[in-house]
Image: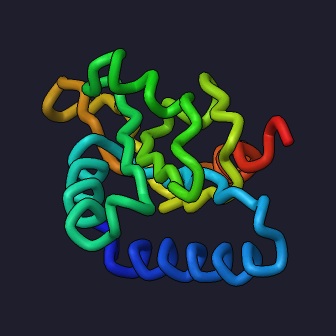
């Protein structure tokens, strides 16, 4: 599990920074924030926390995971209304297979779900592991991909 309140505080810090910069440049729009989580349980927990703690008029919380209906997943590619910041909660599906053109910030928990084989139990298991340096670099590169 992750310290979601710290991520929550980081989102608020990034938003405050954006609002200060917007005073100097009124045409500035907030870029999306892409947050990588290992799996659905973490995404769902973060979604509930952020929906309760962040202002829905200024933040649009969108999950990106295979368990989310495809109509809902398409929402991550749409631009939000002016002044609204999109926050995408994603698993490693967003690491390489999709590009979201307005992402300006990536927050990486550094974990992913991986399948492995347990020879003692003779079954496949899904375990949370740390991501490789290459995966971390790939995730970081999702910000500003098309800017």
Placement of the N terminus among the 4 image quadrants = bottom left
Q: Is residue 141 left or right of residue 90?
A: right
Q: Position of residue 37 (x, y in %)?
A: 41, 51
Placement of the C terminus among the 4 image quadrants = top right
Looking at the image, is 121 positioned above or below residue 63?
A: above
Q: Quadrant of residue 63?
A: top left
Q: Quadrant of residue 46?
A: bottom left
For image coordinates 49% across by 37% down, the residue present is 92
Q: Quadrant of residue 55?
A: bottom left
For image coordinates 73% across by 73% down, the residue present is 22
Q: Residue furthest front?
A: 26
Q: Can see residue 96?
A: yes
For image coordinates 19% across by 25% down, the residue present is 123
Q: Residue furthest left?
A: 121
For image coordinates 51% across by 55% down, the residue present is 84
Q: Position of residue 114 (x, y in %)?
A: 40, 37
Q: Is residue 85 left or right of residue 118?
A: right
Looking at the image, is 103 positioned above or below residue 73?
A: below
Q: Position of residue 11 (x, y in %)?
A: 49, 72
């Amino acid at each position: 599990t992750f310290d979601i309140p710290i991520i929550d505080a980081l989102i608020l810090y990034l938003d405050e920074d954006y609002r200060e910069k917007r005073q100097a440049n009124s045409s500035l729009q907030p870029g999306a924030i892409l947050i990588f989580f290992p799996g659905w349980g973490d995404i769902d927990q973060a979604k509930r926390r952020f929906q309760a703690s962040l202002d829905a008029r200024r933040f649009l919380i969108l999950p990106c995971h295979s368990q989310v209906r495809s109509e809902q997943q398409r929402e991550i590619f749409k631009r939000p209304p002016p002044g609204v910041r999109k926050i995408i909660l994603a698993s490693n599906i967003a690491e390489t297979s999709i590009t979201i053109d307005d992402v300006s910030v990536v927050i990486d928990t550094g974990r992913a779900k991986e399948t492995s084989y347990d020879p003692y139990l003779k079954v496949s298991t899904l375990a949370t592991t740390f991501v490789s340096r290459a995966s971390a670099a790939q995730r970081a590169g999702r910000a500003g991909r098309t800017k």
